[in-house]
Amino acid sequence: MPLDVSQHPCFNSDVRHKVARVHLPVAPLCNIQCKFCNRRYDCANESRPGVTSVVLSPGQALYYLDNLMEKTPEIKVVGIAGPGDPFANVKETMETLRLVRKHYPSMLLCVASNGLQTAAYAEELAELEVSHVTLTINAVDPEIGANIYAWVRDGKRIYRGVDGASLLLERQTAAVKALASRGVTVKVNAIVVPGVNDGHISAIAQSVSEWGASILNAIPLYPVAGTEFGDIPTPTPESMKELRGELRQYLPQMEHCTRCRADAVGLLGAAPNPEHLIQLEKAASQPINPQEQRPYVAVASREGMLVNMHLGEADKFYIYGEEKGRYQLMASRAAPAPGGGNERWNDLADSLKDCRAVLAASAGKTPSMVLEQRGLRVVMMEGLIEEGLDAVYRNLPIRAPLRKEHACGSGASCGGNGMGCM
Ligand code: SF4
Ligand code: SF4
C-alpha cells in the first residue's frame, strides 16, 4: 500500500491537530558546530532541538515505539532528529529506520539533518521510503556561513571559517538535489540570526527552491545561554511575518514549527505527557537489544562498595540483580586473563551474557566497542555501586559519570571545538 505522505503534521498543517509524531533519540554525535547550538542541557522542561532526556539504541528505540503505539496509535510519523546529526551516527540511524520500516510498514519516516553527510545515503533513504527529510541550511554564501559554523568535521579533518562553510554548502546542495531527484520531500530549515544572516534568507529560499526543496521553514533564533549567539535577541514575530511574506515568492512557508526536542512525542505543540517520559526512560533501561534476557549488571570493584576499577584491571566482576525492588549481589565471576587482544573482550562478553551493562571506572575504546557490539552497555563512572545500578535499572543520573572516548562534539554533553577533549 503506498504511504499517505499527506499525513505528516509538519508538512501539512491541516493534520497537525490529529496526527502525532515521535522523534527517536538515537543520534548523539554531531559533525559540525553551529554557534547557536548547545547540547549540554538535559532538562525535561527545555523544549528545543538538541535536547533529549536519554539516548536510545536502535533496539531500545523500537521497544519504545512498540510501547508508545499501544497507547498512542495516532502516531503516524517517526523521525530521527538528533540530539546530534543522524548521519554522524549513520549506523544507528539507518538501523533504526530499517527496524521501524520492517515493523511498521505504513509509518511515515522522516529525518532532520545538517546535510553534511546526507547525500551519500539518499539512495538508501529512498529505498526505505523515507518520505520527508529536513535539511537545515543557514547560508548559501560561505562568507556568511563562516560566521554561523564554528567548525565542520569531515572524517578526521576539521575545517573552519570559509573552508568549513564552503564544504558544508557543497554537501547541502548535493543533498537537496539527491533527495529531491529521488522523490523525497525536502524541507529546508533556516535559522534566522539577526545581524548575521537575516538579510540572506531570501537568497537561501531562492537557491534551495532551484535545487528542488519543497518548503521552507524560517525559524527565529532561539538564543541559548553559553553559546556564541546566546546574547543575540530573537527576531520579533512582526519581522518573521514580514520575512515569510517575502519568502513565499520562492517556496511555501511552514509557519507552525514548534522547535521540537530530539525526543518529542505526541501532537505538535501539545504539552509533554509524563507517561511518554516514563516509557522513554523504561526503554533506556533495557538491554541494548531489548529482546535479550539480561537481568544482571556486572561491576568492576575492588571491595564491592564502589565502582573503582578499570575494566582491564579487574580480575573479577561482581554480579548484581534486582529482586523485589532491591539490588542483590548474586555472584562474582572471574575476569578472563589479560592479553589475547579482542579475544579477551569476547570472552568477557560470553561470561557476562546475562548482564545488560558493566560498570567500570574507565574502559578503553576497543573493549567498549567489542562489548557494546555484543549487547553489553559499558557505563563509566566513579562512586557507589548502587548509584550505577540506579542509572542502569532506573535511568537516574550519575553524579560522576566519566566520558567515553569519543569523537569531538559528541554526546548531549559536548559542545566541543572539534579538537577533541582538552
Ligand atoms: Fe548544529 Fe549539530 Fe547542533 Fe544540529 S546538533 S544545531 S547540526 S551543532
Ligand atoms: Fe516538525 Fe518543527 Fe518539530 Fe521538526 S521541529 S518535528 S519540523 S514541528
Image (spheres, helix red, strand yellow):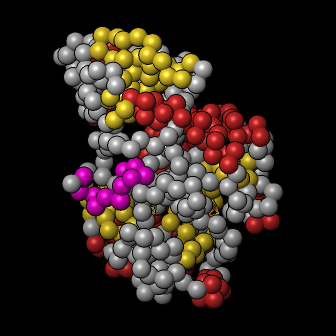
Q: Is residue 329 left or right of residue 416?
A: right
Q: Is residue 1 left or right of residue 409?
A: right
Residue 280 visible, this orientation? yes
**Residue toward you, 322 or 379:** 322
**Residue toward you, 315 or 329:** 329
Q: Identify the residue at horizontal 55%, vertical 77% (top origin).
A: 220
The answer to whether 149 is drawn above or below residue 154 in the figure is below
Task: Write down the region rendered in magenta.
Answer: 410-421
Q: Identify the residue at horizontal 41%, vertical 41% (top origin).
A: 398
| Residue 418 is covered by the magenta coloring | yes
Q: Identify the residue at horizontal 52%, vertical 81% (top origin).
A: 234
The answer to whether 243 is drawn above or below residue 336 in the figure is below
Give residue 297's quadrant in the image. Answer: top left
Toward the left, the furthest residue is 339
Residue 169 in percent (x, y) is at: 40, 68
Magenta segment main secondary structure: loop
Residue 355 in percent (x, y) is at: 45, 20
The answer to whether 421 is drawn above or below residue 60 in the figure is below
Q: Identify the residue at horizontal 50%, vertical 44% (top origin).
A: 55
Q: How many numbered dots are placed on residues in this image? A: 0
Give residue 324's quadrant in the image. Answer: top right
Image quadrant in which the N terminus is located:
top right
| Residue 8 is covered by the magenta coloring | no
Residue 370 visible, this orientation? no
Residue 175 in percent (x, y) is at: 48, 59
Residue 66 in percent (x, y) is at: 68, 35
Image quadrant in which the C terminus is located:
bottom left
Q: Is residue 412 left or right of residue 255?
A: left
Q: Quadrant of ligand 1?
A: bottom left
